[in-house]
Image: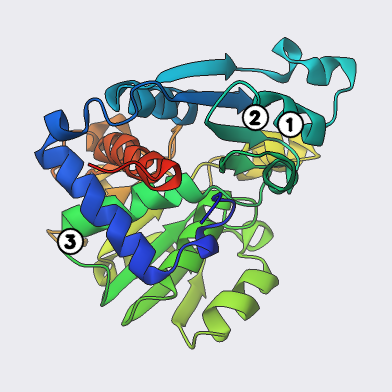
Amino acid sequence: MGSLISILDLSVEELDGLINVANDIIDNPKKYSEVCHGKKLATLFFEPSTRTRLSFEAAMYELGGNVIGFSSAGDSSASKGESVADTAKVISCYADIIAMRHPKEGAPLVAAMNASIPVINAGDGGHNHPTQTLADLLTIQREKGRLNDLTIGLCGDLKFGRTVHSLIEAMARYTGIKFVLISPDELKLPSYVKNDCLKEHGIEYIQTTDLEAVMPELDILYMTRVQRERFFNEEDYLRLKDSYILTPEKLKNAKPDLSIMHPLPRVNEISVAIDNDPRAAYFKQVLNGKYMRMALICKLLEVTV
């Protein structure tokens, strides 16, 4: 496997393999501390990011490698009109692997087609965010002990939420999965995701606007923010942004072993009062993202431990 553009680039066996390596990194960090010595990761972030960019950088440093790159399009030759294809060819001369975030869907794929080194999609528009999905899968596996036989509630912006789309694609390949899709009508899961993923794999799902009504069924509740940057219309954003706010009161009928997840950044869709609830897993999710990115870098650079 040369690059990672979509979570579907990885087979279930490869996903399970990455999870196993990540768990080994957690248990034996010293074993991995120099495996990327002399290697360079280029972080090409044409769109703002905190967690994803710093997580990739931390991952590479903890593997003993180095990091070069930029954190906004304005700091790159893109501001002079350089194409993504040319940028990928240039960076291939300087680095061993690229992590790219771009506001345009498909840009990391163009980069991968033109680079001579592996490219990791670190998020492209409303399309894909495969390394967030890897963080999600490790979190589910560590919190629940399995990736099968789970009822997963996805709540908030299911229309533009690339993390939601990628997670559905990944989990649809495991057995005994049921999705509960909780959103306002305007932010429903796109029909192509329903058709290509849920219906195609015969996955059970229900759609609802009522979070509290379905809360008792859920093993996992995956909250998302309503993303201002995906709206053309400020009025629509303001009307929908507070559709679902998770509070301790709304958790009163939840399972005692529910896992609450969120790709972050959080705006106000999870009350800070929930941060100390043992069911809150979203900050663990951040840490798990670093370990999965470490495992992925090892795989793509074909380093042996």
In this rendering, which labeled residue sits more in front, label 3 or label 1?
A: 1
**Figure check: 156 above or below 47:** below
CA separation, marks 2 and 3?
Answer: 40 Å
In this rendering, which labeled residue sits more in front, label 2 or label 3?
A: 2
Q: Residues within 10 Å of mark 1 (few under 14, many from 20)?
A: some
Tell me the quarter of the picture where residue 210 sits. Answer: bottom left
The residue identified by callout 3 is 144
Question: Which residue is the extreme one toward the bottom?
Answer: 202
CA separation, marks 1 and 2?
Answer: 5 Å
Tell me the quarter of the picture where residue 303 sits. Answer: top left
Q: Are marks 1 and 2 in contact (CB under 8 Å)?
A: yes
**Figure check: 52 above or below 204:** above
Instruction: Tell whether 144 sits left or right of 41.
Output: left
Name the residue type under label 1.
Lys
The residue identified by callout 2 is 92
Name the residue type under label 3.
Lys
Instruction: Tell whether 125 sits left or right of 251.
Output: right
Residue 298 drawn at (x, y percent): 36, 41
Residue 97 drawn at (x, y percent): 53, 33
Q: Quadrant of the C terminus?
A: top left
State the residue in front, 52 or 16. Answer: 16
Name the residue type under label 2.
Ser
Could you tell me which secondary element the residue under label 1 belongs to?
helix
Could you tell me which secondary element the residue under label 3 belongs to?
helix
Image point 45% across, 45% down: which residue?
300
Sequence-earlier tag: 2 or 3? 2
- Give the number of the disc on residue 89: 1
Question: Which residue is the extreme one toward the top?
Answer: 75
Could you tell me which secondary element the residue under label 2 belongs to?
loop
Instruction: Tell whether 272 sits left or right of 125.
Output: left
Q: Are marks 3 and 1 in contact (CB under 8 Å)?
A: no
CA separation, marks 3 and 1?
Answer: 42 Å
